[in-house]
Image: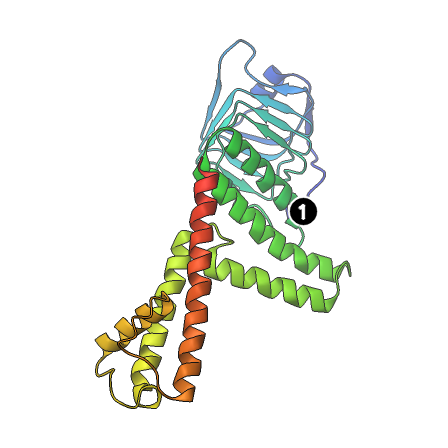
Amino acid sequence: MPANLFQVDGKRVDTFSDFLSNENDSKWENLLYYPAKFEKENEGILHLVEKSFIEVSFKDTEFHRVSFVKCVFERCLFMGGKFVDCEFIDCTFTNTNTSKIKISSCLIDPCDFDSNFDFKVDTNIAIDLFHSIYKNSIEEHQPERAIDSLYRMKRAERFHLDSQLERKKIGLKKYIIEKIKYIIHEWISGYGLKICRVFATSVFFIIFFSYVNFIYRDSIFENGKIENPVDAFYFTCVTLTTLGFGDIAPVTYGGRLLVSIEVLIGIVIISIFLTAVAQKFMRTR
């Protein structure tokens, strides 16, 4: 069942105390929560630990100063809801509608929603949620969560192209071009947010071109300047980093073409790496 569920059937509860009385074995199930706010009746933080919420509607509800620890939310509605000064620690969301929720002064991990969305039908809801978490994380100076939420928002945007094509909002040509751009950007650098992916991509190209340069060394250099894998690795690193010491150089037309391609790839990788570092630095300030 996707997270675009818009209706929950169950018992209506009109007060917060009435809701608490419906707890059964650390679980609330099939309830329609009607009060405007979900908060402790006296001042203080409401702590809910290892609780389950199954098919509970909290539509347009404002949660204030609530701590959810190891809680499970399954097929719940939070549409139009608002979370203020709340925290979610090791919680799990499944098939829960979070459309148009507002998050402020909260501690919330976007990873908690990894099993929540079906990206065939939930892309708009997912994009909206991760954008809300991103804004909250920036305001609360939570850089790692900000990066994680932005990364998930970009992935949701990639899947959103599928629904746009299906609804004929974009043409096939634009879909293919944009899809390829998203896939390459995610694979190489995690949308400029994952430095480790840029590093892994760099290692891949170094190993690949080191192998090519060693196997085809006679066709590239003719004079045998590359005599072993270490020479090939050294030449590849110098080439991809555009240092160009000149102690080893191609002499054939095919070799020059290949090395030119290696240089261009090296420039691209270096540019992506510096961009990723700059973006991460900017978002962690």
What is the quadrant of residue 221 in the picture?
Answer: bottom left
Residue with the mark numbered 1: 124
Q: Nearer the viewer, residue 60 or 104?
A: 104
Looking at the picture, the colour scheme in use is rainbow
Q: Above or below — where is 207 with respect to 73?
A: below
Q: Quadrant of the C terminus?
A: top left
Q: Residue furthest front?
A: 246
Residue located 65% across and 44% down the image: 125
Q: Residue furthest top?
A: 42
Circle 1 — which element? helix
Residue located 45% across and 33% down the image: 142
Q: Locate residue 70, reporting x and y percent.
A: 44, 33
Amino acid type, residue under disc 1 in the picture: Asn
Mark 1: few/some/many CA within 10 Å (<14, 14-19, 20+): some
Q: Locate residue 170, reporting x and y percent.
A: 75, 61
**Left of 71 or right of it: where is 237?**
left
Residue located 52% across and 9% down the image: 43
Q: Locate residue 220, reporting x and y percent.
A: 35, 86
Q: Nearer the viewer, residue 221 or 38?
A: 221
**Left of 12 or right of it: where is 218?**
left
**Left of 116 or right of it: where is 217?**
left
Q: Above or below — where is 40 with respect to 118?
A: above
**Left of 61 or right of it: where is 272?**
left
Q: Is residue 122 visible?
A: no
